[in-house]
Image (cartoon, grey):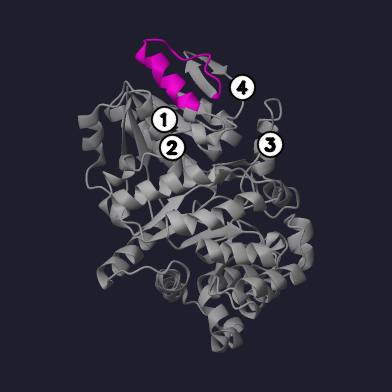
Amino acid sequence: MRVLFVLKEVGLTEPLGVMYLSSSLRQAGHQTKSVQFERVMNPFSIIRDYKPEVIAYSVTTGFHSYFIELNREIKEKYPGFISLFGGPHPTFFPEIINDDGVDAICVGEGERAVVDLANSLDGGKLPIDVPNIWIKDGRRVHRNPPRPLERDIDKLPEPDRDVVYNEDRYLASDPIKHFLNLRGCPYDCTYCFNHAYRELYSENGGYPVRYHSVNRVIKEVSEVKRRYGVEFVRFLSDVFATKKSWLREFAERFPRDVGLPFSCNVRADLIDEETAFLLKKAGCVSVLMGIESADDRMRMLVLGRKMSRDVILRASELLKGYGIAIYSQNMIGLPGETFKMAIDTLKLNARIKAEFAWASIFTPYPRTRLGDYAVRLGYFDGDYDNLNYSYHSRSALTFRDKDDKEKIENLHKLFSIASRFGFLRNMIDFICELPLRPIYWLVYRLWYGFALKRYIFPVSFGARRFIESICRLFRKDEG
């Protein structure tokens, strides 16, 4: 069975979800390939030559309309394949199955499901009873519940990086590579879909945090290092270490057996003296840590992040004490937020001396509590089909003060660089009132590329690669 993964385009982070699906399919004897539709010169020729029997799309809300229209266009040119939509949007909006051209969707984690689907199709049978799969049979839709999650994720094959690297030499040669050390998150932030995942799997054992063994992580990183010459590791798991026993073993073995610097995601309320020490010992040089908002009520009650400002300040102090750089994560343009509140968040980032202070413009994703909250209070009209796919450009919300919306959208572009330079913070109110957004976009992208490589993911690269990185960011964030 020939399966083609269709992507819009990949920025600087490998699509690990696609890679995991591809490895499961290849292990079962199927063929896989990927194409980035917005990056190659003639993507339709790839479809013509490869003749896929299944075309799979990994879809997030905001991109769903793009992929639905693209799938229709492909079906007009090359009919006869089964279209499979997976990812967060089909999982939480399974009614996408009713759109023209959508033949099947995968709800929830898909490694086992896509293999069962491909095996059935390979045997000439329509997979109407495959767990996790909803599929059309004429006018009827077969809706299958999710199977229990694989508790021992070491049993899943390592991600098939070649399915993307073979088509994207930039990613293949990038000295930064991305990994997962666990799946799931035990927390319940209102802007995240974790609570919806737990509801989805509530009758199948829930949605627990599942760790790879330290052995598996070391084996996978070592193999990628051997094949691709990795200089820096990024762990993308939601929270890197919620178990100190795992972190203690990792801190002993990773520097000895792998010896690469890395970055990971942490929560401020999990950072104590021992955790900061173990991260440093293991080779951690930077962490991504969520602040989200400086306003205690907004952070604790609206966002569901049960931690005080003092906890954030203490965690930052501990990390700085061990020489670990902070890539802070923030949201501005939240429901009910004013421009002044967003400025307070900027000032808190300056106070903790974050090396890189990232801010996204809040996007009201469906089936999240904060998305529902925004609709209920009239900040968002609930039209997810018109939702902007980028949380880098403009807000989907209605603001009580229209000027605040314009200023917050400008602040987003200047947030990180202003957190580093006091003279910009002193003028930020005035600057954000100016109609200079194209210039602010340029500043944002150049600073983003420079600061990440300089402070957060320090790797050696030349001017040519820096320019190429910026170009990929320009293309990815258009709109």
Q: Mark 1 points at which residue?
A: 24
Q: Is mark 3 on a helix, strand or loop?
A: helix
Q: Mark 3 points at which residue?
A: 198
Mark in the foreground, 1 or 4: 1
Is there CB contact under 8 Å for labels 1 and 2?
A: yes
Q: What residue type is labelled 1?
A: Ser
Mark in the foreground, 2 or 4: 2
Mark nearer the N terminus (2 vs 4): 2
Percent position (x, y) of residue 74? 32, 32
Locate the N terminus and report the quarter of the image it occupies.
top left
Q: What element carries label 2?
A: helix
Q: Mark 2 points at which residue?
A: 20
Say if 278 sits above or below 224 in the image: below
Mark in the foreground, 3 or 1: 1
Q: Which amino acid does label 4 sit on?
A: Pro
Q: Mark 4 points at which residue?
A: 145
Residue 363 visible from this viewpoint: no
Q: Residue at 63%, 72% (x, y): give it.
A: 403
Percent position (x, y) of residue 101? 42, 27
Q: Residue at 35%, 57% (x, y): give it.
A: 230
Between the residue at mark 1 and the residue at mark 4, the CA separation in whole angstroms equals 20 Å
Image side of residue 408 versus residue 43, left or right = right
